[in-house]
C-alpha cells in the first residue's frame, strides 16, 4: 500500500488543497531572515510555494508519486510536505 499512500500525498501536494494554509499569530517578537515579526502579527503561509520548490522535490512540476517513495518503494516522510498548514509540526520547543 505504500504506492497508494504516495499517490494520495502527491494529490495533496500537487493540488495544494489549502494553498495559503491556516492563519496563525506570533506569540512573541521573532527575528526571521533579518526581519522582526512583532508579537500578535497574523502569519499566513504560502504552502503552494513550498510544494513546488525545486530544492525540495525531485519532480516539482509534474504529478509523480515517486516524490514520496524511497529507493525501495517504501513510503518516506517528507518534511516539506504540508498539505493543510504550517502549524505545529510536533517538534519540541
Image (cartoon, helix red, strand yellow):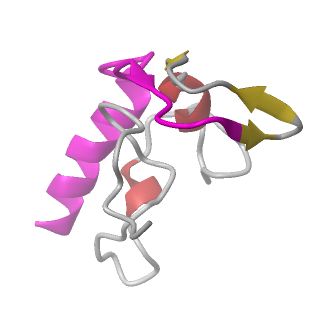
Q: Is residue 44 above or below residue 82?
A: above
Quarter containing the C terminus: bottom left
Quarter containing the N terminus: bottom left
Q: Point out residue 4 in the picture as x, y percentages from the top left corner.
A: 16, 54
Query: Could you say which is closer to the camera, residue 37 or residue 48?
Result: 37
Q: Residue furthest right?
A: 34
Q: Which residues are magenta?
A: 1-30
Q: Is residue 54 above or below residue 79?
A: above
Name which residue lies at 36% across and 71% down.
Answer: 76
Q: Is 31 on the left or on the right of 18, as rendered?
A: right
Query: Could you say which is closer to the camera, residue 40 or residue 3?
Result: 40
Task: Reply yes or no: does residue 7 show up in magenta.
Answer: yes
Query: Could you say which is closer to the camera, residue 48 or residue 66?
Result: 48
> How many numbered dots are placed on residues in this image?
0
Q: Is residue 5 above or below residue 76?
A: above
Task: Reply yes or no: does residue 23 show up in magenta.
Answer: yes
Determine the image quadrant of residue 69.
bottom left
Q: Is 34 on the left or on the right of 86, as rendered?
A: right
Name which residue lies at 43% across and 75% down.
Answer: 70
Q: Point out residue 65 in the picture as x, y percentages from the top left corner.
A: 37, 50
Name which residue lies at 64% across and 35% down.
Answer: 29
Q: Point out residue 14 in the picture as x, y percentages from the top left corner.
A: 42, 29
Determine the image quadrant of residue 73.
bottom left
Amino acid at each position: 500500500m505504500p504506492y497508494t499512500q504516495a499517490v494520495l500525498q502527491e494529490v495533496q501536494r500537487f493540488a495544494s488543497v489549502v494553498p495559503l494554509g491556516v492563519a496563525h499569530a506570533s506569540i512573541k517578537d521573532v527575528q526571521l531572515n533579518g526581519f522582526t515579526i512583532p508579537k500578535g502579527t497574523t502569519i499566513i503561509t504560502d504552502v503552494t510555494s513550498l510544494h513546488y520548490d525545486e530544492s525540495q522535490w525531485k519532480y516539482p512540476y509534474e504529478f509523480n508519486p515517486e516524490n514520496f517513495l524511497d529507493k525501495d518503494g517504501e513510503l518516506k516522510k517528507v518534511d516539506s510536505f504540508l498539505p493543510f498548514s504550517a502549524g505545529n509540526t510536533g517538534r519540541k520547543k
